[in-house]
Image (cartoon, rainbow, N blue to C red):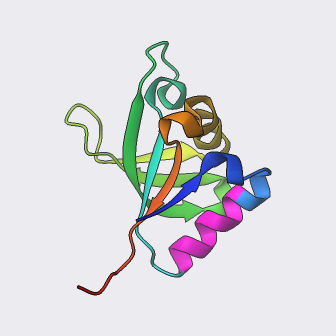
Amino acid sequence: MIYHPISSFVTSKSFTDFIIESVEKDKDLLVCFDHGKLSGSNIQGGHVCLLDRIYKLKSLIRIIDPQQNQPKWRMVKINTLKKAMEFHSDDKSAGFWEFVETSV
């Protein structure tokens, strides 16, 4: 896996462009963020989802959530996801985790 820390995305444009490029190249990305910040609750804690699609014109991202009590597919605002990742910070591995093929 390749880790892309949230701190490497200084602007919203670089954040969004990275997602667009990754989706266009059909890359598989895990997204690590603070669950409370994303859902608007006061409960803090890290969470990981799979990035599924981006709807740039609507400023939305669709994520796939493995948590049992959450909808499997959720639409979230791009800027809300970025803020939840920034809050979680590099110290807690916030950012994108890209799956890569390796030869055995």
- Relative to 80, does residue 53 appear above or below in the rendering? below
Residue furthest front in the image: 104
Q: Is residue 20 highlighted in magenta?
A: yes
Q: Which residues are magenta?
A: 15-24
- Viewport quadrant of the N terminus: bottom left
Report if residue 78 is visible in the image.
no
Q: Position of residue 79 (x, y in %)?
A: 67, 42
Residue furthest left in the image: 68
Frontmost residue, 20 versus 45? 45
- Relative to 38, does residue 79 appear above or below in the rendering? below
- Relative to 80, does residue 73 appear above or below in the rendering? below
- The secondary structure that dominates the magenta segment is helix
User: Which residue is drawn at the image coordinates 48% and 64% (left, top)?
Assistant: 53
User: Which residue is drawn at the image coordinates 38% and 69% (left, top)?
Assistant: 99
User: Which residue is drawn at the image coordinates 32% and 45% (left, top)?
Assistant: 65
- Viewport quadrant of the C terminus: bottom left
Residue furthest bottom in the image: 103
Q: Position of residue 23 (x, y in %)?
A: 52, 72
Q: Position of residue 54 (x, y in %)?
A: 55, 62
- Relative to 41, does residue 21 appear above or below in the rendering? below
- Quick check: 38 left or right of 50? right
- Quick check: 58 left or right of 33? right
Report if residue 103 is visible in the image.
yes
User: Which residue is drawn at the image coordinates 38% and 36% (left, top)?
Assistant: 47
